[in-house]
Amino acid sequence: DFSAMREIWLCLKPGGLLLLAVPTAAQGNIQFPFHRIYGPERVRPLIECYEMIGRVWDGKSVEGGLEKSNVDPPLFVTLSSLNDTGTIFDARLGKKLESWQHQHVLVLRKPFNAGSECPLNVRGAWSSSPVESYETDNMKGNKRQR
């Protein structure tokens, strides 16, 4: 994911837009080998080269960056009700969602004054390898229930 964001940076002209959708929650999680749930500790470094203009989810838009992540609809929901099937109950929507379905579309822009190099740390908050990331999460006590 970090390598891809770096490649996109190189392809975008200054002022170019990127629409990025990743599953988000209050705490990141690896659903190895299927997908990753992005928490704030992973989203921040993932988009650090870009200017976040806003986000859209469930027909609502929020202008601004991560400082507005708690504005309704919240970007990082608490998955405390995550059960063994990987579903969550969204009280606002009144229905169950798969954890990967909570994907806001982030509207990102490459800054107009951007140089050719993105200072994005390719290894990021965790390793870029899903297996290493899974092991890192397990060492932190974030074991996935099977």
Image (cartoon, rainbow, N blue to C red):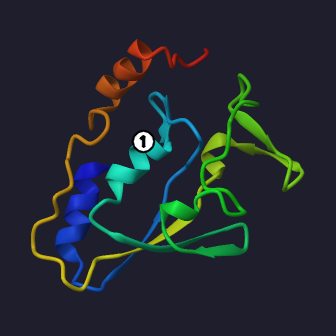
Question: Which quadrant would the C terminus be assigned to in this image?
Answer: top right
Q: Going 22% across and 52% down the picture, which residue do you hit?
A: 3
136 w.r.t. 103: above or below: above
| Residue at position x 51%, y 19% in the image | 142
Farthest residue toward the left? Answer: 116
In this rendering, the count of numbered labels is 1
Q: Is residue 137 left or right of residue 3?
A: right
96 lies left or right of 25: right
Residue 74, given in percent of the width and then of the height, sits at 67, 56
Q: Which residue lies at the image location 47% right of the left edge and 39% below the top edge?
A: 36
Amino acid bearing label 1: Glu
Farthest residue, direction right: 94
Would residue 90 be found to the left or right of residue 71 on screen?
Answer: right
* Image position, residue 127 (x, y; %): 27, 33
Residue situated in front as seen by the camera: 54 or 96: 54
Question: Viewer-proximal residue, 64 or 139?
Answer: 64
Tag 1's secondary structure?
helix
Vertical position of residue 44 compared to residue 49: above or below:
above
Q: Which residue is mark 1?
A: 41
Q: Position of residue 103 (x, y in %)?
A: 59, 56
Residue lying farthest to the front in this orientation: 67
Q: Could you tell me residue 39's position as x and y percent?
A: 50, 42
Residue 140 sits in which quadrant? top left
Compared with residue 94, is residue 66 higher up or lower down, i.e. above or below?
A: below
Q: Residue at x 35, y 21 (%)?
A: 136
